Amino acid sequence: MSTEKKGGKAVARIYRKRIELFRLIDKIKLWPSRKGVLHGIRTIEKMGDQAWITTHCNKTFKIYNSRRSRAARWLRNKWFSGVCGKCAVPDWKLEKYSATRFRRHYGSFLLKENSKNG
Ligand SMILES: [Zn+2]
């Protein structure tokens, strides 16, 4: 029985800065439209490097798994001009979104922090 890796629950959700777009939206389930309106994602249908997103307001977006796309940048910087009324994104989700931080080399950074404690 070795469950040493369990139980390390981080307080803030921090993702690597170069996280793939698909993994990012898998986690936060939000999608910024071209106008900067945040929609809640209902389903993601992945097909290789492309995916179809269906939002709660029944809009579909074709997206590419790119770290450099407009949406990836918007999501990382947490820019949005509004929230879709039909998707009714709950406040806790928006708070989670704005509490998400991105750091380079997150893993190694965390290890150093831990060794200082105690
Ligand atoms: Zn919507």
Image: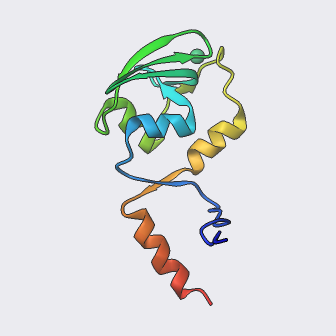
Most extreme residue toward the top is 58
Residue 60: give x, y in percent of width and height: 48, 11
State the residue in front, 114 or 100: 114
Which is nearer the eye, 66 or 39? 66
Dividing the picture into quadrants, the one containing residue 73 is: top left
Q: Looking at the image, in which quadrant does ligand 1 appear?
A: top right
Determine whether, in the image, residue 107 is placed left or right of residue 66. Answer: right
As drawn, 118 above or below 1: below
* Horizontal side, residue 7 vs residue 74: left or right: right
Where is residue 22? Give x, y as percent: 42, 34
- 105, above or below 26, in the image: below
Residue 107, picture quadrant = bottom left
Residue 56 locus on image (x, y percent): 62, 16
Q: Residue at x 46, y 25 (%)?
A: 36
Residue 32, position as x, y percentages in the image: 47, 26
Give the mark count.
Answer: 0
Quarter of the rendering occupied by the C terminus: bottom right
Given residues 99 and 43, the one toward you in this image is 43
Residue reaching furthest to the bottom: 118
**In the depicted structure, whether residue 85 falls above or below residue 99:** above
> Residue at (57%, 54%) from the top-left corner?
13
> Where on the picture, by quarter, is residue 68?
top left
In the image, what residue occupies the spot 68% across and 66% down?
7
The quadrant of the picture occupied by the N terminus is bottom right
Height in image: 103 above or below 20?
below
Colour scheme of this structure image?
Answer: rainbow
Q: Residue at x 33, y 26 (%)?
A: 48
